[in-house]
């Protein structure tokens, strides 16, 4: 663990010493102690941005443990996301009245940008008749939805856009070219503002795209600084610029929004995704989605289907294809839905290594890998009830087995290891940990391990 963290928070030293022999009570006590120490540290700091950076450093460290079975890693990361990050921003809301001269024009611009993104998300979710899967069916997911499938994701993006516009667009250029004519020629005379945005769509899209590109550059700069600071031979103190801290802030707040509204926001779902959602080429999206669903429905075999889809891959950008494929995977009738196997084969076939795959198919890889982790969370939550539901546990375990079964165990080894790590300190789930770690998640032994879990839980809940 990073020395400065361990030195400043003794509870983190205890956290680092947790191992496979640590029981659930000890893990929970240590995690609670770390959270309390963090709260005290944040309360006493005079620099909120420094506190946010320290919390981000700790989360980065926890994420670096993906290939290690640590019984408290996931619980601490989840506690930080759900408890600490929201507290870091509670005091940020402005108390004073905003008397910006062009407040109404600014509000209309935020509306325009946010509505465009929301409309594109509606198309991706198949809620618009032009989508080839419109009203034909929808895949049911047993875990919280991916961000692009979630209705409330758009409201989180709106909050992000609002903050950026107020911080970055209150300048002479935007005032002269957008806010002044919008106020003078539209708002002041009661005209329809939508006409203004239609007439100036090229210029406005250009300015918004530049803003999102600025956010992408800041994200990339922060990532590079984190890599540099992780090198022992590099003495960089990883100081972030005010612009980078702003980007970190809006990203953190979007993460808080996803936690509150129960949708999955991958780490890769940053400004590149938001830009893709804003600039989505609807014609190309609809054509490709239809091609994928036709290939799935009418293809002679799986290999031919994947081969046909590979041709679409070559015609689209990386993240653009991820969005198209995930839409085709979730919306449509049963025969035309892109299968999990095809989705994974496309993902794995995009690169020879895991690292390259995560870069080439960031959204698809995140969605495939997180599902068993999120199901493991649900299983753990159910087992911790004073009196649980055995039938519900059986259904969850079956979903978990299916999620693990369809994952490529080599490419998604860290995610499978994470599942074992999460269950490690729960006595009733030790058979599933054994199945994952020692038995290679073999189909033949799962049902025995699931029965052992049932026996353990029936004893715990006094059902025998």
Image (tube, rainbow, N blue to C red):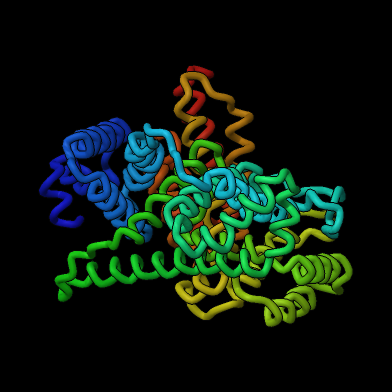
Q: Pick the residue in front: 260 or 180.
A: 180
Q: Residue at x 76, y 65 (%)?
A: 282
The answer to whether 4 appears left or right of 134 in the picture is left
The answer to whether 275 appears left or right of 71 in the picture is right
Q: Is residue 61 visible?
A: yes
Q: Which residue is drawn at 26% across and 40% down?
A: 22
Q: Pick the residue in front: 4 or 199.
A: 199
Q: In which quarter of the image is residue 104?
A: top right
Q: x and y percent of residue 30 in the render?
A: 24, 36
- Examine the rendered structure and indicate whether residue 398 appears above or below residue 328: above
The answer to whether 230 appears left or right of 250 in the picture is left
Can you name the residue that lies furthest to the left here?
7
The quarter of the picture where the N terminus appears is bottom left
Q: Residue at x 33, y 47 (%)?
A: 73
- Examine the rendered structure and indicate whether residue 416 appears above or below residue 263: below
Q: x and y percent of residue 27 in the render?
A: 28, 37
Q: Pick the residue in front: 356 or 272.
A: 272
Q: Pick the residue in front: 344 or 459.
A: 344
Q: Which residue is drawn at 63% across and 51% down?
A: 184
Q: Can residue 437 be seen in this view?
A: no
Q: x and y percent of residue 247 in the render?
A: 40, 57
- Examine the rendered structure and indicate whether residue 238 appears above or below residue 88: below
């Amino acid at each position: 663990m990073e020395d400065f963290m361990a030195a400043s928070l003794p509870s983190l030293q205890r956290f680092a010493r947790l191992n496979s022999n640590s029981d659930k009570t000890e893990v929970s006590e240590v995690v609670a102690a770390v959270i309390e120490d963090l709260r005290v540290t944040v309360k006493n700091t005079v620099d909120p941005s420094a506190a946010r950076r320290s919390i981000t450093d700790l989360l980065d460290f926890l994420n670096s443990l993906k290939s290690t079975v640590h019984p408290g890693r996931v619980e601490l990361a989840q506690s930080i996301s759900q408890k600490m990050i929201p507290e870091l921003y509670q005091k940020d809301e402005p108390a004073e009245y905003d008397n910006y001269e062009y407040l109404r024009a600014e509000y209309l611009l935020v509306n325009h940008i946010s509505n465009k993104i929301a409309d594109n998300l509606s198309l991706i979710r198949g809620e618009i008749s032009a989508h080839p899967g419109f009203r034909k069916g929808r895949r049911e997911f047993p875990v919280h939805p991916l961000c692009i499938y979630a209705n409330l994701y758009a409201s989180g993006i709106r909050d992000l856009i609002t903050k950026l516009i107020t911080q970055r667009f209150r300048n002479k250029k935007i005032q002269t070219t957008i806010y002044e004519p919008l106020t003078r020629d539209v708002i002041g005379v009661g005209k329809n503002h939508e006409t203004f945005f239609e007439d100036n769509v090229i210029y406005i899209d250009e300015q918004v795209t530049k803003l999102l590109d600025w956010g992408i550059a800041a994200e990339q700069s922060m990532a590079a600084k984190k890599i540099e600071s992780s090198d022992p031979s590099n003495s960089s103190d990883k100081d972030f610029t005010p612009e980078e801290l702003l980007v970190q802030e809006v990203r953190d707040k979007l993460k808080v929004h996803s936690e509150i509204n129960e949708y999955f926001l991958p780490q890769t779902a940053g400004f590149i995704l938001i830009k893709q959602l804003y600039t989505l080429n609807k014609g190309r999206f609809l054509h490709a989605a239809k091609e994928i669903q036709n290939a799935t429905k009418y293809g002679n075999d799986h290999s031919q289907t994947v081969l046909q889809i590979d041709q679409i891959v070559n015609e689209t950008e990386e993240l653009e294809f991820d969005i198209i494929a995930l839409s085709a995977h979730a919306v449509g009738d049963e025969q035309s839905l892109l299968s999990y196997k095809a989705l994974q084969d496309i993902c794995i076939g995009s690169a020879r290594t895991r690292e390259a795959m995560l870069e080439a198919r960031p959204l698809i890889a995140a969605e495939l890998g997180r599902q068993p982790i999120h199901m493991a969370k649900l299983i753990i939550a159910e087992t911790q009830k004073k009196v649980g539901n055995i039938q519900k546990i059986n259904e969850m375990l079956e979903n978990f087995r299916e999620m693990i079964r369809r994952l490529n165990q080599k490419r998604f080894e860290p995610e499978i290891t994470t599942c074992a790590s999460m269950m490690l300190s729960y006595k009733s789930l030790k058979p599933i940990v054994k199945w994952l770690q020692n038995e290679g998640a073999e189909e033949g032994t799962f049902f025995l391990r699931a029965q052992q879990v049932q026996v353990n839980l029936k004893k715990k809940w006094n059902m025998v």
